[in-house]
Image (cartoon, helix red, strand yellow):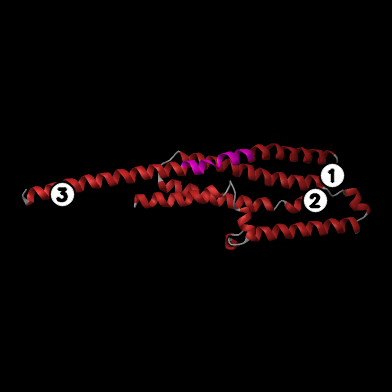
Amino acid sequence: MNDQKLFALWESQNQKLEETLKLNKKLVREITKGQLRDTIGSLRSPKLFALLIAIPYTLLLCFFVFIGKQAGAPFVVIGFGLIALIMTALIIGYLYHIYLINQIQGTDEISKVQKQIAELKVSSFNLTRLAVLQLPLWSICWISLDVLKSSPLLYGGVNLLIFLLLSYIAYWLYQRLNVQNSNSKVYKFFYSGNEWDPIIKSSHILEQIKEYDS
């Protein structure tokens, strides 16, 4: 066999090898994309379950606001009203999360998926911090205006101390849930579990897909 035939055979084998490698790379990429869809899709159930609880819970809060208004109880209206507003924001946020999950599962464009996962991560981060702000509002809900008028120093002072204590705890948690404190136990406690771990895992899988495309 002359050199020309050997070279042609080598070229043919080399081309087949490259095609096989490309096919294997494509298969691995598709499998990895399937893992990404499954991982991000695992967020849907806990989000829907949270909505199933949050929506009637918020309606109940609105009912308390209505009762408080009818009874002439301003602190009940203010406390439960503000908590209901925060809960409404959380519900809207969770609905947006489900929308993002559906978008991520329905697209093959890596740039879009990367942007949507980033939005999902930031939104989840902000909603968790927002949720802790309702803590001091619970101390307002139970204040009686009549008792406050009859005992402004003792009753008012005790409730003020409770409000300030809960406000400090809420502020402390809000600060600990900052990304700069990502190594703290509080941060790791809140940003973990079935509503957070799939987001982190999806980000790692996305990086693998980007490596296959490079």
Residue span colored magenta: 37-49
Alpha carbon distance from label 3 to label 2: 82 Å
**Residue 157: where, in percent of width, then height?**
86, 59
- What residue would you read off at disc 2? 140
The amino acid at mark 3 is Trp
Assess disc 3: are there few (<14), some (14-19) or many (≥20) residues with their C-alpha within 10 Å of its C-alpha: few
Residue at image location 60% in from the left, 43% down from the top: 94
Mark closer to the observer (3, 2): 3
Q: Earlier in the sequence, mark 1 or mark 3?
A: 3
Alpha carbon distance from label 1 to label 3: 89 Å
Near-viewer residue (111 or 18): 18
**Residue 72: where, in percent of width, then height?**
85, 42
Circle on res. 10: 3
Proximity of marks 1 and 2: CB atoms separated by less than 8 Å: no
Q: Secondary structure at mark 1?
A: loop
**Residue 74: where, in percent of width, then height?**
82, 46
Q: Secondary structure at mark 3?
A: helix
- What residue would you read off at disc 1? 73
**Left or right, 178 with reference to 154:** left
The amino acid at mark 1 is Ala
